[in-house]
Image (cartoon, rainbow, N blue to C red):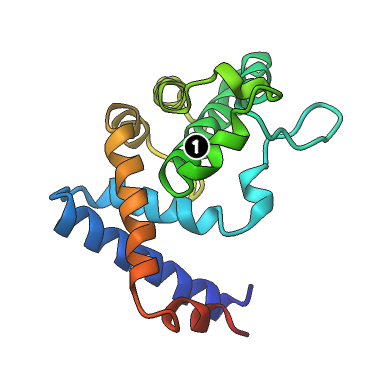
Amino acid sequence: MKATHSSTLNRYFAGVAEYVFQSHLGVADPPLVDYVSGLLMRFVRSESIHKVRSLTGRPLTEVAEMLVEANARVGTARRSVHRHIGDFTLFWAGVYPEALREMQSPTKKDHFIDYCSQGKRAYFIASTIEAEAESENEAPAPILERLSQQFELCAYGLREIRREWERRDDEELPMLLID
């Protein structure tokens, strides 16, 4: 994705997230809203959705596998996997909840996983592990803690963001993605 298109898409997600959270939900928490719009931006690229990998390099696609991996790691690596579990569960529960039926089918390891409770738990655990250094990719602990506490509200906000982008003129988003 070219930088200008990435910047335009980032502004689009930020604007829609701000509109939905403030106007529809009455949530005036800029850092939280920025995190949610940043999540959308990160997950535009499918490799970001499955960024956690096993020791052999295989992308982990199920929360159950990610939990095992998180428990095998220490320090900031553990924080990163728990944060990703929170992001992963929030994204699917919020933006594409209809996909959960397949993701939690009886043939999957995630069959008995409650995405909301695991997402809340993962964000909370990540919030308790100190980041080595504040960087652009690190989420501050207070944001992760609020995501844990307000997981359902954020998932609902993401569903509303999706409704909003679907409601808007069909030409608006595709124009952002054209090279």
Of residues 77 and 6, the one drawn nearer to the viewer in this rendering: 6
Place residue 130 in its image quadrant: top left
Residue 86 vs 99, above or below: the answer is above
Residue 54, horizontal then vertical, whole percent: 78, 28
Q: Is residue 134 visible?
A: no
Asked which secondary structure carries label 1, the reply is loop
Of residues 98 and 173, the one drawn nearer to the viewer in this rendering: 98
Q: Which residue is mark 1?
A: 133
Residue 11 vs 77, above or below: the answer is below
Q: Quadrant of the N terminus?
A: bottom right
Question: Which residue sits at x=29%, y=32%?
Answer: 146
Q: Quadrant of the C terminus?
A: bottom right
Q: Residues within 10 Å of mark 1 (few under 14, many from 20)?
A: few
Question: Which residue sits at x=13%, y=50%?
Answer: 26
Question: Which residue sits at x=17%, y=55%?
Answer: 24
Residue 58, horizontal then vertical, whole percent: 81, 35
Q: Is residue 87 visible?
A: yes
Q: What is the three-letter code of the residue carrying label 1?
A: Ala
In the figure, is residue 41 to the left or right of 156?
Answer: right
In the figure, is residue 146 to the left or right of 83?
Answer: left
In the figure, is residue 160 to the left or right of 110?
Answer: left
Question: Which residue sits at x=60%, y=26%?
Answer: 63
Of residues 63 and 127, the one drawn nearer to the viewer in this rendering: 63
Residue 150, horizontal then vertical, whole percent: 27, 33
Place residue 17 in its image quadrant: bottom left
Place residue 139 in its image quadrant: top left
Q: How many marks?
A: 1
